[in-house]
């Protein structure tokens, strides 16, 4: 099971070979506001970041791959995993269940990488309760509700009923904006991506995460015997 004290190994591109705490980086937004697009851009641009693949009870969609987009499981298997404590977090979303398996996240951290989560406010809250300061939460807002609906319809993947349900849920999700560390407005995907990337880089450099910095500073302060 994930522990807040999990450490990343020293990176080869760090000349001082500092160790640091891993970042559990959460992106949330209402459906259609852009978190999946930003997530893909971030993963392509950052070699130290790996995606946490959720388990879900919903049916696989055309073009999706089991184990890549989601771990697709039936409801009995999902309940079994939840009962066994295999999830870091899980929630009901649009009539289906979604959860984050703990073991792969531990493995990503142990390999020296940070973890990206594409989850809703319920999952973000549960993850923060578990791992505290290792979790960085970013909420992405649409520029307007009208634009959000336009984007949902432009995807041409959902019925009117599903879009109406997503819009209704969007208002509820946005109400939890103040439970996040950072809140961005996605007027432009490229600009929003750069803001998210800046947040991640800054969080990695926080003094509280630079566990190897203590020994380095002590050496600087110790008089040279020669």
Image (cartoon, grey):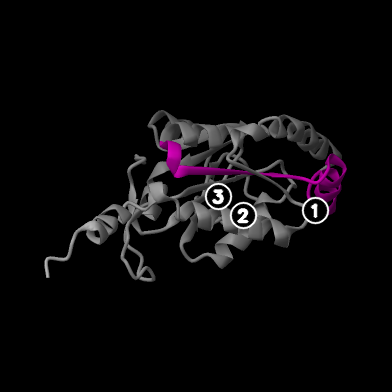
Q: On the rendered image, what quadrant is the N terminus found in? A: top left
Horizontal side of 60 relative to 151 (left or right) equals left
**Whole-percent x and y of residue 136?**
52, 44
Q: Position of residue 15 (x, y in %)?
A: 34, 71
Total numbered circles: 3
Whole-angstrom CA distance, mark 1 to mark 2, is 23 Å
**Relative to residue 153, is residue 63 drawn left or right?**
left
Residue 176 appears in the figure: yes
The image quarter in which residue 12 lies: bottom left
Residue 191 left/right relative to 108: right
Residue in the picture at 64% in, 56% down: 195
> Residue at label 3?
70
Residue 7: numbered disc? none
**In contact (CB < 8 Å): disc 3 and disc 1:** no
Does 40 appear in magenta?
no
What secondary structure is found at the residue carrying circle 3? loop
Which element carries disc 2, helix, strand or loop? helix
Give the residue pinned by disc 1. 155
Q: Which residue is mark 2?
A: 196
Distance (Cα) linking label 3 and label 1 = 20 Å
Residue drawn where x is 82% and y is 52% of the image: 156
């Amino acid at each position: 099971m994930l522990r807040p004290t999990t450490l990343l190994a020293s990176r080869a591109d760090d000349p001082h070979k500092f160790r640091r705490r891993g970042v559990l980086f959460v992106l949330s937004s209402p459906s259609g506001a852009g978190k999946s697009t930003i997530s893909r851009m971030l993963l392509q641009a950052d070699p130290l970041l790996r995606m946490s693949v959720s388990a879900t009870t919903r049916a696989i969609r055309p073009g999706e791959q089991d184990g890549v987009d989601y771990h697709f499981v039936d409801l009995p298997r999902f309940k079994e995993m939840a009962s066994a404590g295999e999830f870091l977090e899980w929630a009901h979303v649009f009539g289906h269940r979604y959860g984050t398996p703990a073991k792969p996240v531990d493995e990503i951290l142990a390999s020296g990488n940070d973890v990206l989560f594409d989850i809703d406010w319920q999952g973000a809250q549960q993850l923060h309760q578990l791992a505290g300061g290792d979790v960085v939460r970013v909420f992405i807002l649409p520029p307007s509700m009208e634009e959000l609906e336009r984007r949902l319809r432009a995807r041409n993947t959902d019925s009117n009923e599903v879009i109406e349900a997503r819009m209704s849920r969007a208002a509820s999700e946005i109400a939890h904006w103040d439970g996040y560390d950072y809140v961005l407005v996605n007027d432009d995907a490229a600009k929003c991506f750069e803001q998210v990337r800046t947040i991640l880089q800054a969080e990695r450099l926080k003094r509280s995460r630079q566990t190897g910095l203590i020994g380095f500073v002590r050496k600087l302060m110790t008089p040279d015997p020669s």
